[in-house]
Image (cartoon, grey):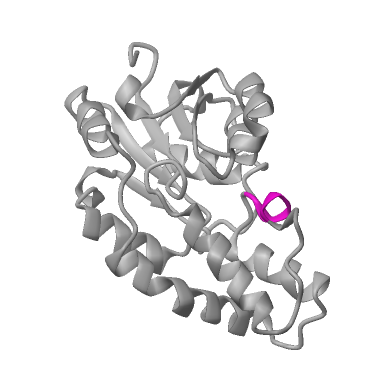
Amino acid sequence: MFDNFDAVIFDMDGTLIDSMWVWRRVDEDFLQKRNIEVPVNLQKEIEGSSFLETAQYFKDRFNLNENISDIVAEWICLVKNYYENVIALKPGAFDFINMVKENNLKIGLATCNSRDLTEIILKRTGIDVFFNAVVTGSEVTKDKTCPDIFLEAAAQLDVHPSRCLVFEDTLSGVQGAKRAGMTAIAVHDEFSHPYKEEIASTADRYIIGFTEI
Protein backbone atom coordinates (compact mmCIF):
# COMPACT_ATOMS: atom_id res chain seq x y z
CA MET A 1 0.00 0.00 0.00
CA PHE A 2 3.03 2.28 0.24
CA ASP A 3 4.25 2.03 -3.37
CA ASN A 4 3.10 5.54 -4.31
CA PHE A 5 4.29 7.28 -1.14
CA ASP A 6 7.48 8.49 0.47
CA ALA A 7 5.96 9.56 3.80
CA VAL A 8 3.08 8.81 6.14
CA ILE A 9 1.62 11.59 8.29
CA PHE A 10 -0.50 10.67 11.30
CA ASP A 11 -2.99 12.67 13.31
CA MET A 12 -2.67 11.88 17.02
CA ASP A 13 -5.84 12.26 19.14
CA GLY A 14 -8.55 9.88 17.95
CA THR A 15 -6.25 8.34 15.35
CA LEU A 16 -3.18 6.95 17.11
CA ILE A 17 -4.38 7.38 20.68
CA ASP A 18 -7.76 6.85 22.33
CA SER A 19 -8.14 10.29 23.90
CA MET A 20 -11.24 12.05 22.58
CA TRP A 21 -13.30 10.95 25.59
CA VAL A 22 -10.86 12.88 27.81
CA TRP A 23 -11.39 16.11 25.90
CA ARG A 24 -15.16 15.78 26.04
CA ARG A 25 -14.95 15.28 29.80
CA VAL A 26 -12.62 18.27 30.22
CA ASP A 27 -14.86 20.54 28.15
CA GLU A 28 -17.88 19.52 30.20
CA ASP A 29 -16.06 20.00 33.52
CA PHE A 30 -14.72 23.39 32.40
CA LEU A 31 -18.18 24.70 31.52
CA GLN A 32 -20.06 23.12 34.42
CA LYS A 33 -17.56 24.68 36.81
CA ARG A 34 -18.81 28.02 35.48
CA ASN A 35 -22.49 26.95 35.59
CA ILE A 36 -22.67 26.96 31.79
CA GLU A 37 -24.82 24.39 30.01
CA VAL A 38 -22.84 22.24 27.60
CA PRO A 39 -24.15 22.67 24.03
CA VAL A 40 -25.11 19.46 22.26
CA ASN A 41 -23.05 20.33 19.18
CA LEU A 42 -19.95 21.54 21.03
CA GLN A 43 -17.55 18.81 19.89
CA LYS A 44 -18.55 19.26 16.26
CA GLU A 45 -18.03 23.02 16.51
CA ILE A 46 -14.47 22.76 17.84
CA GLU A 47 -13.35 19.67 15.92
CA GLY A 48 -9.93 20.13 14.36
CA SER A 49 -9.29 23.49 16.02
CA SER A 50 -6.03 24.41 17.69
CA PHE A 51 -5.78 25.18 21.40
CA LEU A 52 -5.80 28.92 20.72
CA GLU A 53 -8.73 28.73 18.31
CA THR A 54 -10.76 26.62 20.73
CA ALA A 55 -9.97 28.93 23.64
CA GLN A 56 -11.05 31.93 21.56
CA TYR A 57 -14.24 30.09 20.61
CA PHE A 58 -15.02 29.37 24.27
CA LYS A 59 -14.25 32.94 25.30
CA ASP A 60 -16.52 34.40 22.61
CA ARG A 61 -19.38 31.91 22.76
CA PHE A 62 -19.64 31.72 26.54
CA ASN A 63 -18.64 35.32 27.33
CA LEU A 64 -15.73 34.27 29.53
CA ASN A 65 -13.71 36.86 31.44
CA GLU A 66 -10.49 34.81 31.42
CA ASN A 67 -7.82 35.57 28.86
CA ILE A 68 -6.87 33.00 26.23
CA SER A 69 -3.64 31.88 27.90
CA ASP A 70 -5.42 31.21 31.20
CA ILE A 71 -8.08 29.10 29.48
CA VAL A 72 -5.44 27.02 27.69
CA ALA A 73 -3.43 26.62 30.90
CA GLU A 74 -6.49 25.32 32.76
CA TRP A 75 -7.24 22.78 30.03
CA ILE A 76 -3.67 21.50 30.05
CA CYS A 77 -3.76 21.21 33.83
CA LEU A 78 -7.00 19.21 33.63
CA VAL A 79 -5.79 16.74 31.00
CA LYS A 80 -2.09 16.36 31.84
CA ASN A 81 -2.61 13.48 34.26
CA TYR A 82 -4.55 11.56 31.60
CA TYR A 83 -1.70 11.95 29.11
CA GLU A 84 0.89 10.99 31.71
CA ASN A 85 -0.92 7.94 33.11
CA VAL A 86 -4.14 6.89 31.40
CA ILE A 87 -4.48 7.42 27.64
CA ALA A 88 -3.38 4.47 25.50
CA LEU A 89 -2.52 3.77 21.89
CA LYS A 90 -5.31 2.44 19.72
CA PRO A 91 -5.14 -1.29 18.90
CA GLY A 92 -2.56 -2.02 16.23
CA ALA A 93 -1.17 1.52 16.14
CA PHE A 94 2.33 0.67 17.37
CA ASP A 95 2.73 -2.29 15.04
CA PHE A 96 1.47 -0.29 12.07
CA ILE A 97 3.87 2.62 12.67
CA ASN A 98 6.67 0.09 13.02
CA MET A 99 5.66 -1.46 9.69
CA VAL A 100 5.77 1.97 8.04
CA LYS A 101 9.29 2.44 9.42
CA GLU A 102 10.36 -1.00 8.18
CA ASN A 103 9.18 0.03 4.69
CA ASN A 104 11.65 2.94 4.85
CA LEU A 105 9.05 5.70 4.66
CA LYS A 106 9.45 8.97 6.54
CA ILE A 107 6.94 9.46 9.34
CA GLY A 108 5.34 12.69 10.46
CA LEU A 109 2.80 13.78 13.06
CA ALA A 110 0.31 16.60 12.50
CA THR A 111 -1.73 17.34 15.63
CA CYS A 112 -3.70 20.30 16.93
CA ASN A 113 -2.70 19.30 20.45
CA SER A 114 -0.05 21.24 22.38
CA ARG A 115 3.67 20.49 22.07
CA ASP A 116 3.85 19.68 25.79
CA LEU A 117 1.07 17.08 25.81
CA THR A 118 2.20 15.64 22.49
CA GLU A 119 5.71 14.98 23.74
CA ILE A 120 4.37 13.44 26.96
CA ILE A 121 2.18 10.86 25.22
CA LEU A 122 4.65 10.06 22.43
CA LYS A 123 7.40 9.26 24.93
CA ARG A 124 5.14 7.34 27.33
CA THR A 125 3.79 5.10 24.56
CA GLY A 126 7.23 4.61 23.05
CA ILE A 127 6.37 5.86 19.57
CA ASP A 128 8.43 9.06 19.77
CA VAL A 129 11.40 7.25 18.19
CA PHE A 130 9.50 6.70 14.94
CA PHE A 131 8.81 10.31 13.96
CA ASN A 132 11.00 12.32 11.61
CA ALA A 133 8.82 15.42 12.05
CA VAL A 134 6.26 16.50 14.65
CA VAL A 135 4.05 19.54 14.01
CA THR A 136 1.62 20.64 16.74
CA GLY A 137 -1.00 23.27 17.41
CA SER A 138 1.69 25.20 19.26
CA GLU A 139 3.34 25.96 15.91
CA VAL A 140 0.44 26.00 13.41
CA THR A 141 -2.62 27.74 14.79
CA LYS A 142 -5.07 27.33 11.88
CA ASP A 143 -7.68 24.60 12.21
CA LYS A 144 -7.34 21.35 10.32
CA THR A 145 -9.78 22.21 7.56
CA CYS A 146 -6.87 24.32 6.31
CA PRO A 147 -3.93 22.46 4.72
CA ASP A 148 -1.26 24.39 6.64
CA ILE A 149 -0.36 21.82 9.30
CA PHE A 150 -0.08 19.02 6.73
CA LEU A 151 2.00 21.14 4.37
CA GLU A 152 4.31 22.08 7.23
CA ALA A 153 4.76 18.40 8.11
CA ALA A 154 5.54 17.58 4.47
CA ALA A 155 8.04 20.45 4.31
CA GLN A 156 9.82 19.25 7.44
CA LEU A 157 9.92 15.73 5.99
CA ASP A 158 11.16 17.15 2.66
CA VAL A 159 8.51 15.16 0.79
CA HIS A 160 6.14 16.50 -1.89
CA PRO A 161 2.52 16.58 -0.65
CA SER A 162 1.39 14.26 -3.45
CA ARG A 163 3.74 11.61 -2.04
CA CYS A 164 2.26 11.81 1.47
CA LEU A 165 -0.32 9.41 2.92
CA VAL A 166 -2.34 10.82 5.83
CA PHE A 167 -4.26 8.97 8.55
CA GLU A 168 -7.01 11.04 10.23
CA ASP A 169 -10.13 10.38 12.29
CA THR A 170 -12.08 13.62 11.79
CA LEU A 171 -13.83 15.24 8.85
CA SER A 172 -11.84 18.44 9.32
CA GLY A 173 -8.57 16.53 9.26
CA VAL A 174 -9.49 14.59 6.13
CA GLN A 175 -10.57 17.82 4.43
CA GLY A 176 -7.31 19.54 5.32
CA ALA A 177 -5.22 16.63 4.08
CA LYS A 178 -7.07 16.54 0.76
CA ARG A 179 -6.69 20.30 0.37
CA ALA A 180 -2.97 19.82 0.89
CA GLY A 181 -2.97 17.50 -2.12
CA MET A 182 -2.39 14.36 -0.09
CA THR A 183 -4.05 10.95 0.01
CA ALA A 184 -6.20 10.55 3.12
CA ILE A 185 -7.26 7.38 4.92
CA ALA A 186 -9.93 7.93 7.57
CA VAL A 187 -9.66 5.93 10.79
CA HIS A 188 -12.82 5.15 12.75
CA ASP A 189 -13.23 6.74 16.16
CA GLU A 190 -16.29 6.57 18.39
CA PHE A 191 -16.49 10.34 18.71
CA SER A 192 -16.45 11.01 14.95
CA HIS A 193 -18.79 8.10 14.16
CA PRO A 194 -21.91 10.34 13.80
CA TYR A 195 -20.20 11.87 10.75
CA LYS A 196 -18.94 8.58 9.32
CA GLU A 197 -20.71 8.83 5.96
CA GLU A 198 -19.37 12.30 5.21
CA ILE A 199 -15.89 11.36 6.40
CA ALA A 200 -15.87 8.17 4.31
CA SER A 201 -17.06 9.98 1.19
CA THR A 202 -14.36 12.65 1.58
CA ALA A 203 -11.46 10.29 2.35
CA ASP A 204 -9.78 8.01 -0.16
CA ARG A 205 -10.42 5.06 2.14
CA TYR A 206 -12.15 4.40 5.47
CA ILE A 207 -10.85 1.83 7.95
CA ILE A 208 -12.16 0.63 11.31
CA GLY A 209 -8.65 0.41 12.74
CA PHE A 210 -5.00 -0.30 12.02
CA THR A 211 -5.45 -4.03 12.63
CA GLU A 212 -7.37 -4.36 9.35
CA ILE A 213 -4.49 -3.10 7.21
Left or right position of 93 against 188:
left
Q: How many marks?
A: 0
Question: Residue drawn at (54%, 81%), measured in percent from left and top?
Answer: 74
The reply to whether residue 27 is visible in this rendering is yes
In which quarter of the view is residue 191 placed?
A: top right
Residue at the image position 30 percent from the left and 68 percent from the top:
84
Which quadrant of the figure contains the N terminus?
top left
Residue 86, how many percent across, how many down? Answer: 31, 63
Position of 154 relative to 60 (above/below): above
* Residue 176 visible within the image: no
Residue 44 within the segment the image draws in magenta: yes
Where residue 52 appears, as percent x and y from the top left, is 63, 67
**Residue in view at x 62 percent, y 45 percent:** 144
Q: Nearer the viewer, residue 207 or 21?
A: 21
**What span is colored magenta in the figure?**
43-47
- Whether 54 is drawn above or below 193: the answer is below
102 or 126: nearer the viewer: 126
Specify whether 64 is left or right of 166.
Answer: right
Query: Can you say which quadrant of the picture contains the C terminus?
Result: top left
